Amino acid sequence: MRILVCVKRVPAPGSRINVTPDSLNVDTNHLGFTTSPHEECAVEEAAQIVEQHGGGVTVLTVGPSEAEEQLRYAASVGATAFVLVSNDTGIDWDPQQTADAIIESIAELEADQGQFDLILFGNESADSGGHQVGIRVAVALGRPAVNGIKGIEVGVQGVTARREVDGGYEVYSLEIPAVLGVKEGINLPRYPTMKGRLASKKAEISARETQVAPGAQQRRRLHQPEETVIETEILGTSSDAAPKIVDLLEELGVL
Amino acid sequence: MAGVYVVVEHDQGQLAPSAGEALTAARRLSDHLNEPVIAVVIGEATTEFVSLCEEHGIPKAVSVLDPQIVDYGPELWGQAMAELFSLTEARVVMATGTDRGNEILAQASARAQIPFVANCINAEFSGAWELTRMQWGGSLLEDVTLDTSSLFISYAHHSVEAEPLAAASATQIESIEMNLDPVLCRSLVQDRVTLSEGTTLSTAAVVVSGGRGVGSAEGFASLEALAGLLSGKVGCSRAVTNNGWRSHADQVGQTGTRIAPDIYIACGISGAIQHWVGAMASKNILAINTDPEANMVTKAGYAVIADLHEVVPAIIAEIERRRGNSTST
Amino acid sequence: MSEFPSRARCVVIGAGIVGNCLVGHLSDMGWEDIVLLDKGPLPNPGGSTGHASNFIFPCDHSKEIVDLTLESQRQYEKLGLQNTCGGIEVARSEERMEEFKRRMTSAKCWGIPSTLLSPAEVKDLVPFISEDVILGGFYTPSVSAVDSLETGTQMRKKAQEAGHLEVFANTEVIDIETAHGTNKPKITAVLTDKGRIECETVVIACGVWSPRLAEMAGATIPLTPAVHQMADVGPFDVLVETQQELAYPIVRDMDTFCYERQTAGSMEVGSYAHRPILHRVDEIPSNEEAALSPTEMPFTADDFDQQMEEAIELMEFLGDGEIKYAINGLLSLTPDANPVLGPTVEVENLWSAAAVWIKEGPGVGRLVAEWMTDGYPHFTDPHGADIARFYPHQRNVHHIEARCDEHFNKTYGIVHPREQWASRRDVTVGPVKSRTDALDAFYFEAGGWERPHWYESNQDLVDAYGIQGRQHEWDSRWWSPISDAEHLHLRDHVGIVDLSAFQIFEVSGPGVLPYIEHMVVNKCDVAVGGSIYTPVLNPSGGFRSDLTILRLTESRFRIITGAFDGGRDEYWFRHNLPGDGSVQFENRTNAICTLGLWGPKAVEVLATITETDLNQAAFPYGSCQQVLLAGLPTEMFRVSYVGDSGFEIYAAMQHGQALWDAIMEVGGACDLRPVGAAVYGTSGRLEKGYRLMGAELENEYNPVEAGLARPKVKAADFIGKAEYLKARDSDLCAQLCVLSIDDLNCEAGYLRFPMGAGNEPVLSLSGERLVDAKGRVSRVTTAGNAPSVGKYLLMAYLPIEACDRGTKLQVMYQNELYPVTVEATGANLAVFDPDNGRMKA
């Protein structure tokens, strides 16, 4: 299997996310960066598939040059080839622009090295959560795409993908090449080993420049949602609070 | 170009819980734009669908028909909506931002080559689109503008409460026959597997959830017992999943399940952002935590500042005591 | 939850290991109205304690640090929160193996059982180590790992249960309020987001946040947050199957500055090898903003790669372990790597208890509690950790960052006792710097000042006196044979010493006499022009300082103290000023420079540029006169720390260079040479048996034991008098002695030269430590060559039964034993010219 995984570098915030003074970005001053969680699982899934069925995992990201860190991380957990499509504008491209950049890169990568059997995306990015880049890429490539995937089995003809729904899952059988949007929970991603980390330093990253057309969607401002100030009613400070709690449950009609 | 077309989500004819939300949001947008609202069902218009439309005073609905639409398929449904869009010259195509709603709109917008803005909580047009949408699962908001006239929009799930009208009015149903590209049937649902009957985490009226404070997989036994007594479900935080104490299917949060129960009982959960955004739509929250300043406690309407390992068994005992009393009297 | 208080006697800010232990000890010592605040949640408020590796290697070269560490281990053990797993430092270089010999010496001195191991012996204890990359190990069975969070919790709870303490977590301090005090601002209240607490005393135990808190009160706590990287790697079968938290000794890979510590199935790999990564306090995120805790900052993997490679070299299996958790953990660094403890110099009743490792936390808790309760700690003398040790130019971020940047990678380094700083040099220079530069002075830093230690221009004297070099590089590091040559030249002719670094204070006013009598042991009511050399005591009767006082006028005294002691002495003298304004204190250090001229020709040289009669009769030893020297107004003080006749000459700073030039010009006829501080501070002083603050003199010893008790005690009361009187009446159990080494030959057959760095034990002939009746260990406090008597001399306190002249003992240096003989004890320790005939000539 030749698998392409598209990942995004995102900040790893605490319980409060601050924005920059110009309100256009997350203030990442003391934040680390990580691979968006769904995509981290996509990389792991790809690595597992390749371990079982052979092939290679190419990881592609669109972002600032620092996103090299996420590619090296992918290298440390089993990915084999790396593409950084640089966007050094300081602000994310909109979903269509991002998709365009990926589509162009895939065209060139496939022209060089042949088709990817599987292209994995995260269901949505942890930060902007546009819910569409993978699908736009799939539509442009004319390939089937299903999102919300929490299980992939590679068969002779294609892949069987499980999509999580309330109370169970749906099953899709897709011929390859196909595009899947993966969700966290599909696996428990491995951590890099020290050897993996050290080897990842030698990974060759192919850097790509691309021109994208102006985007339709313009970011004006990031802001905190208005916090509804809640007066917390303390029902007690020990197990003596149990009667009060049960009163509350009765009152809400859930008992 | 006219009309606000809203996708009413269903699975094999059964309306999604979010359907009323979608119609409510669509009505508001149609009022704002002063354009008619048209409800869209992909497949047959069931009586359930029609009565929901009537409850919401939707004058007109469209049933998109194609013999190939035997079940859900993101590509087929997306293509149907894209074709409907060009056929009707719709101004707006919208849906609730569920997994399926976002997927249909992403497919449709890509095919129609129109921008799609997911998980909005507000949309206005005055010469250009001005939208407010969720980032980071809702812990940060983004104001965006778009210079286009037509737009695909999803409204964040649970951001709008369904508000049927006081008096229902008749809905006229129009069927539109399509001749969709058969190749798109390649991504239809092939099979369904049910893991749990009845209530699920996302539909449960009561969710009893545990965090790092539970301490172990075994520690969830009392939470299971309490959830059982309340006919609820057990949830957990990401720390719990990462520690392998429970399966990811139980995880409440940005990358897990988003819930909106009548009461969320959060035991030993600090309330990290990624968890909070999955739980914030809960109608009531009871936090049980030893730390009075834990994020979960300060955001909860009710709190008990004590060790969950003592409080949860006490609640169970109290419920059993009352039930014992009520059966004996 | 209790009501937020509006008043307390003492507010301790910071519930890490230090704050928690401090409130526990304060409660034990009778403090009843304490409030402990932290802006984070409990039990882990998010400071450095929460992510510490929690292990303790007790052996260090510094007595103060070892005392704090051993005391901490005792407390952890008492609470049952210590896991004694043993620890091995491993060497990859010959230099490190040499260092292990020094560590063995320290271990012997402090009574910490330790052994040197061969690589195979290391492997016996740590079977997964790659023994071929190491040369050997230094094994300490008492190395332990502790539960610092639980220790803090228990210490805090103990005080709460006693009813002495209220604790408020998630409470952020917004301001520390002060009002005019006696001589400086004093604490009045702490303002928090929960309310305002009026209080008398505030302790800042906030680790990396301490500078911000101090600033709120207008004080400084000189430390910087710095990154220590660590990663948790695993799981490994070899560790998992032990089913223990710590089944193997903790390994410190000293030459790569890394450690490997088992934590159940995983290994924690930590490093002090990465580039120094210093942060400003404002860069630390809040609890809400941080992804983990505020002091667990995002891991910068690039900085750790080399450490990983080296860790894999040492333990190959580590390479296959998953990196489950990795942080840039923040800890506190100070300019000299010691803690910052005690009362702040700027604000009355504001205390610092910061820059403390887990290994010292409980000990520091006790120490600061003793300090707050009794005026000075008992169980060890913290002069090296006293926050007052820093001068103003050393308290700002430029100095702090420069020095921390320099010493971070020495955390596991081999630091020579005489090692000099490279950064922030030439910041404080005296008036003759251009002249000493021209003479190729080699400078040591003394309290920030550039002070010539020897002069390369005197190289010719080395041949003239036939001074030998030292064979072992360690002995010759930061040392020159020129010093011995300068010494002999001074004794034969005359030498000039740049003493610009002297710390000079003047106190004056109507209340000055009772004030100064109160401060010091010896009688100060001497004639104008008279001088007093005197101990300064703590309330406990131990040494706080020793210094010289000149009576300039009826109501003005000049206090002269050493470059290393000025900060602490200034604090003490200011702190004790009367509140009625009857005494003024001025620090004149920057206004007055000092030159010293000694040797048989000193008077002859100076006589050529003054009309004042300098003969002993007209200008006796110990007196001070105003003298016009080469037309420059000076005060000359006939005194000697080196044993030869001569003067300390004080002049206005702006005349210093002219004065130097004038003396040098006329000195040529007598072969006047510049002489460095190595002669002034060590060889000259040692031949005369003069004591040095911080070496022989510290709080644990009193003037009687140091041989500095005068026959009579003055009538006036003074600080420490009661204890001093008690000491005079008690049987002596130890006394300061001078010893000479009988044979300097090491086992390899060449000469070695002990450093006198404080860690070399004096042993009985059977190799046992000498411990006096008060439990104090005999160790070398000063060591050096005595060229004029042809001996290598040591100073040490010995148990009274070993003090007799001629007693044969041994001293350990670099893990080898050298035979020594007691040369002198009591008041007069001079080996050279014991009758002081030369000084009074």
Image (tube, helix red, strand yellow):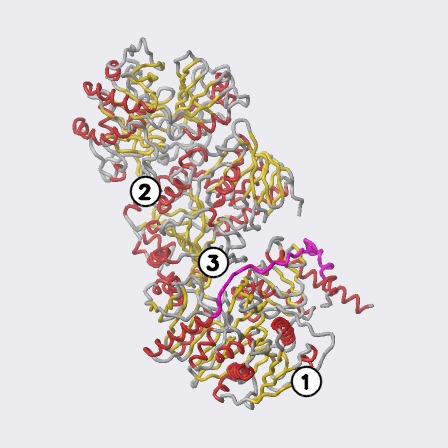
Q: CA distance from mark 3 to mark 1?
A: 62 Å
Residues marked 3 and 2 touching at CB (< 8 Å):
no
Which is more N-terminal, label 2 or label 3?
A: 2
Chain letter of mark 2 equals C
In the image as oriented, which residue stretches furthest toward the front?
Answer: B127
Residue C249: x percent and y percent?
Answer: 41, 52
Give the labeled residue for mark 1: B47
Image check: C411 left or right of C742?
A: right
Residue under the point 32% across and 38% down: C419
The span picked out in magenta is A216-245
Marks 3, 2 in one chain: yes
Q: Secondary structure at mark 3?
A: loop
Residue A160 on image: x %, y %: 48, 82
The picture places residue C215, in percent across and down from the top left corner, at: 50, 39
Between residue C427 and residue B36, name the one nearer to us: B36
Q: Which residue is mark 2?
A: C101
Q: Dot 1 surroundings within 10 Å: few (below 14), some, or many (20 or more)? A: few
User: Quarter-wise, where is residue C734 in the image?
Assistant: top left
Task: Tell me if residue C479 comes above or below residue C517 in the rendering.
Answer: below
Q: Please name the amino acid that badge 3 sits on.
A: Ala
